[in-house]
Amino acid sequence: MAKDNANGGTASEALAWTALWNAASDCGRGSRSIDPQPLRALPAGRKWVREAAKVVFDGLMAGSLSAPGQLAARWDRFGGAITELIVELGKIWGDPAAGRRVQYLLEQMLLDVDDLAAPRRLALTLGIRVDAQNPTSTELPEGVDQICARLMMDSQIEARVQFGALGTVTRRHWLELTQDFVPTERLEPRSDQDSHFAKLAQLAAEAQELVRSSAEPMEPLPAPRRAPAADGHDKDRTSFWDRHFATQDPWKYGSPYEQEKYERQLEILPGGAIGRALELACAEGHFTRQLAPRVGHLTATDISAVAIGRARARCSDQPNVEFGVLDFSADTLPGEMDLIVCSEVLYYLDDLAELRRVARKLAEALAPGGSFISAHAFVLRDNVEKTGFDWNTFGAQAISEALAATEGLVLEQSIQTELYRIDRFRRLSPDEVAAEPRIDHVPIRARIEIGVARKIVWGGARALRRDVARSERRQRVPVLMYHSIADDGPAALARFRCTPAAFGSQMAWLRANGFHAIASEQLEWSIAEREPFAGRPVLITFDDGFQNFADHAWPILRANDLTAEVFLVTDLVGESARWDAHSGPPTPLMGAGTVRRLAGEGAFFGSHMATHRAIDGLSSSDLAAELLRSRMFIERWTGRPTTAFTAPFSVTDRRLGRLARECGYRIGFGGRHGPAGLDGDPIDLPRIEIRGDRSLDDFVAIVEAVLDER
């Protein structure tokens, strides 16, 4: 006990540990007299449970004059007394589950050192040997809900298994447990109503009924709207663009961001009267309607007849506009134009050679002195060190350079923001001398829609996703564990809380360094197939399901084109984190409606159990019920299968993995720290906790360490 005292315990705690050892020793001698008073100074909390089990084990061994391997066989002499002592511990701590946790640990310690030459029936655990080739059904003694077995072949121990049991373990059940090293035979149907699986099915039926009676009917989630990609090509361009316009307003032309670009294109129009104007790639006519009053006659064209139909309807009250279907790359352009506008479309040309050819066509279609206006975004492929869109195309820089290099065209004016530039080129008249262009740098004032923001890498990139996907393969992936994203909260929980600013910096770093987010089911598939991870995947997880995930974390994730998996405490959804109440005001949790909305936006959800109780203090029946109930509620809210879980407080035991699989889970995360690898057990994978009291440099070092483990 001196060791405990040296590690920070008080003298009264040291005396209490001694008293616990003495009480266990008395139990070993057969005494059932327990004086709880000396034990009241024992420190409470999960971290002391294992220490309590060790002290009881040592005292029991001394009092019963037994070697470690003899204790389980002598359980009948002292088992009742030691169980009463442990129940008393739970009362002293005000936490009966903590007492049960000590009981499970103690019995596990006893059976781990026993050869199980004969069955060992303890308070909660049955220890037995089983003939792996010809097993027989095993009835559970009353009170027992855990089995520790030695699977035998030819009198040799082939494997050790420990699992939670709800009822009779049938011959079929034993054969399933041994199928990894015994050839599988035809198994009999599960017909025993008292069997483990029959009772599991009953718990599942009860959970289904609870979900059915507790949840309002929900409409199916709408299919996610996919924004058109800016880096796609199609041999049949007409079909390609018609597919884009299958949905109206695919680029949200009415958004503040797009409207601000339109205003600036109107600002850059040449002075004086504009007679004949040509708009290429007019889409659905949103800019056409604004340009028409500024010109004498406007010909608006697009490659898509679908788009032209909508544009014609939108501008039906503009008598000076005519519409036509035209492929500006392949078709002949009308000539002698005073103005040509061609914006947000030159990215889609096949290559720079085609861009240069089209630029010559545009120059030739202008009348001498005519103007060409182009608005295009900056793309990382042009300059990876500057803010740009992560499209697999050339962008505004390459487009402007190609136009400037076209004979007869000269840049007159450019309005440039961090994300795009709007250029006005002029076709020089014979013998005309070009003037120095006017360059205006202006801020973006409009709010940027999430569909646009998710493709932007601010400040440039150190690595592009498509490049690392081609060049990098790795055996491990970082699974990052977060809890709360908030500026304020109880001081005692600071470790579990990142500020939105810190979280934003971390996600921006991931985006700029070529990481892409995966879901747990992708990780589970890679492990099952032993398929190396392509590029730089990261699994971003959040335990508990705090409302601040929706308020702060999710917008940051979406803006960085990342997603995350949130593990919910399903009985408390819409309430607060009452398990943290001892540290301050409990943090609010997301409601079912919020969960459903975020699932529709691309977030993923898994189980953090139903009540947030540490699982090693739950009976096997309660543990199975929580696993089933939690999964079914999440599936109800999200409309998707739920196959992943995390253990509350990162506490696991030997029952969890098998029960979780039997309850429909395929991947789980326990308490171990580190990256997840292809060689890992998918039902007990490690994670990397991202603490709120660490710097961005610490975060970078943690993630880069995983990159270095290729």
Image (spheres, rainbow, N blue to C red):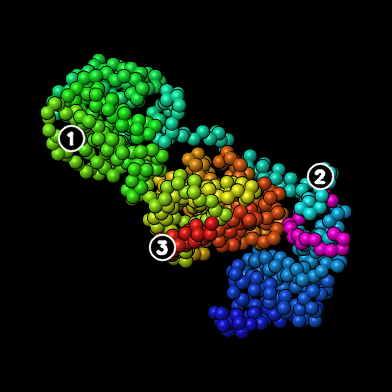
Residue shown at 35%/25% (left/top)?
329
Of residues 95 and 141, the one nearer the viewer is 141
Query: Marks 3 and 1, how far apart in space?
Result: 45 Å
Residue on which the image places disc 3: 697
The residue carrying pointer 1 sits among few (fewer than 14), some (14 to 19) or many (20 or more) residues within 10 Å by Cα, namely many
**Mark closest to the chain's N terminus, 2 or 1:** 2
Q: Is label 2 in a helix, a strand or a loop?
A: loop
User: Where is residue 676 shown, x and y percent of the image?
Assistant: 58, 56
Is 48 positioned to the left or the right of 175 in the image? left
Quadrant (top left, top right, bottom left, bottom right) of the N terminus: bottom right
User: Where is residue 303 shown, x and y percent of the image?
Assistant: 37, 22
Q: Does 500 appear above or below 17?
A: above
- Marks 2 and 3: in contact by CB < 8 Å? no
Query: Marks 2 and 1, how far apart in space?
Result: 82 Å
Is 430 positioned to the left or the right of 309 in the image? left
Closer to the camera: disc 3 or disc 2? 3
Q: Amino acid at mark 3?
A: Asp
Residue shown at 16%/28% (left/top)?
428
Of residues 240 and 637, the one nearer the viewer is 240
Q: Does 432 appear above or below 27?
A: above
Q: Amino acid at mark 1?
A: Glu
User: Where is residue 441 shown, x and y percent of the image?
Assistant: 22, 43
Q: Amino acid at mark 2?
A: Arg
Q: Quadrant of residue 211?
A: top right
Residue 560 numbered tag: none
Q: Is label 1 in a helix, a strand or a loop?
A: strand
The residue carrying pointer 2 sits among few (fewer than 14), some (14 to 19) or many (20 or more) residues within 10 Å by Cα, namely some
Q: Quadrant of residue 436?
A: top left
Closer to the camera: disc 2 or disc 1? 1
Residue 412 numbered tag: 1
Residue on which the image places disc 2: 190
**Mark closest to the chain's N terminus, 3 or 2:** 2
